[in-house]
Image (cartoon, rainbow, N blue to C red):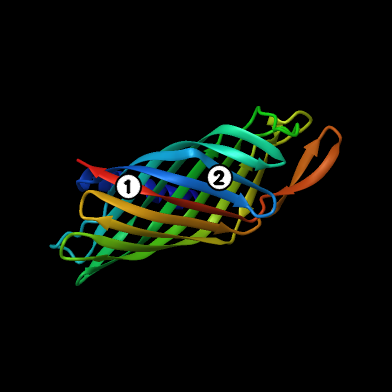
């Protein structure tokens, strides 16, 4: 995974310098759920800024594409009680090759998604302690873009899940002696976007990730096992482009 991440950084940095990007802002509704256990909902919205390019060099058989964004929002927790206004930070970056066949562009590459839920130090409405959570995904984005003669386009993207890593900072909770890092090996994601010329776009993004492995949890009252339950993430929003 470290090799993939390093390759992603090289591709992103090189392409930002080589290609004039589309700059954009995003506003979205964010919803994360561990079915039957808990959920985290944007309160009220997430905000992001990013750079991207899906431009084809007509002098070459293929070009590099890239898309990266950073974002922030607050979430409300519902599960064992409730908490509100929990800061959440996110970065996502993708890069790879793109080729054109008539009005259709086909692309594929590597991607990385990082999310940090700054949730620790709170006590829920039922007296439970919260803790910080970090999520990292490595995946292969692949998809198609269909462009019309007016410059509008549809983008359909499938994210082939390689691996996830979830860090639970349990030492934020009194009596817990270690943090745990769980590995997720199965999941998938997809994105659908409609872009209206060079001005705005609407999108739907989703992730569905299976149960992780199990790690040892040490506490002052004894040991137990912990894992990251299967979870689903949905993001629906608006993108506005600017120069």
Q: Are marks 2 and 1 in contact (CB under 8 Å)?
A: no
Q: Which residue is mark 1?
A: 239
* Left or right of 116, for residue 45: left
Give the mark toward the camera: 2 or 1: 1
Counting from the top left corner in percent of width and height, residue 122 is at 66, 28
Point 44% across, 40% down: residue:
46
Q: Which residue is mark 2?
A: 135
* Left or right of 111, for residue 210: right
Most distant residue in the left direction: 59
Find residue 24 and report its image quarter: top left
Counting from the top left corner in percent of width and height, residue 175 is at 79, 30
* Left or right of 33, for residue 188: left
Task: Count every numbered label the image shows and give the total.
Answer: 2
**In the rendered view of the protein, which quadrant contains the C terminus?**
top left
Counting from the top left corner in percent of width and height, residue 233 is at 53, 52
Q: Say which label, 2 or 1, has the lower sequence index.
A: 2
């Amino acid at each position: 995974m470290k090799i993939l991440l390093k390759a992603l950084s090289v591709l992103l940095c090189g392409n930002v310098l080589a290609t004039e990007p589309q700059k954009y802002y995003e506003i979205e509704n964010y919803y994360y759920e561990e079915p039957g256990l808990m959920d985290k909902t944007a309160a009220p919205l997430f905000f992001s800024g990013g750079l991207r390019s899906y431009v084809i060099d007509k002098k070459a058989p293929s070009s590099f594409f890239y898309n990266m964004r950073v974002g922030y929002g607050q979430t409300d927790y519902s599960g064992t009680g409730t908490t509100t206004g929990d800061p959440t930070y996110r970065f996502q970056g993708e890069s790879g090759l793109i080729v054109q066949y008539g009005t259709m562009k086909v692309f594929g590459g590597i991607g990385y998604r990082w999310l940090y839920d700054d949730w620790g130090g709170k006590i829920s409405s039922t007296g439970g302690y919260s803790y910080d959570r970090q999520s990292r995904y490595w995946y292969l984005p692949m998809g198609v873009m269909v462009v019309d003669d007016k410059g509008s386009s549809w983008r359909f993207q499938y994210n082939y899940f390689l691996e996830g890593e979830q860090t639970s900072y349990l030492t934020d909770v009194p009596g817990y002696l270690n943090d745990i890092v769980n590995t997720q090996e199965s999941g998938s994601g997809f994105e659908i976007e409609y872009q209206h010329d060079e001005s705005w776009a609407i999108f739907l993004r989703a992730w569905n990730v299976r149960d992780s492995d199990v790690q040892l949890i040490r506490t002052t009252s004894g040991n137990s096992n912990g894992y990251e339950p299967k979870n689903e993430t949905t993001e629906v929003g608006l993108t506005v482009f600017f120069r």
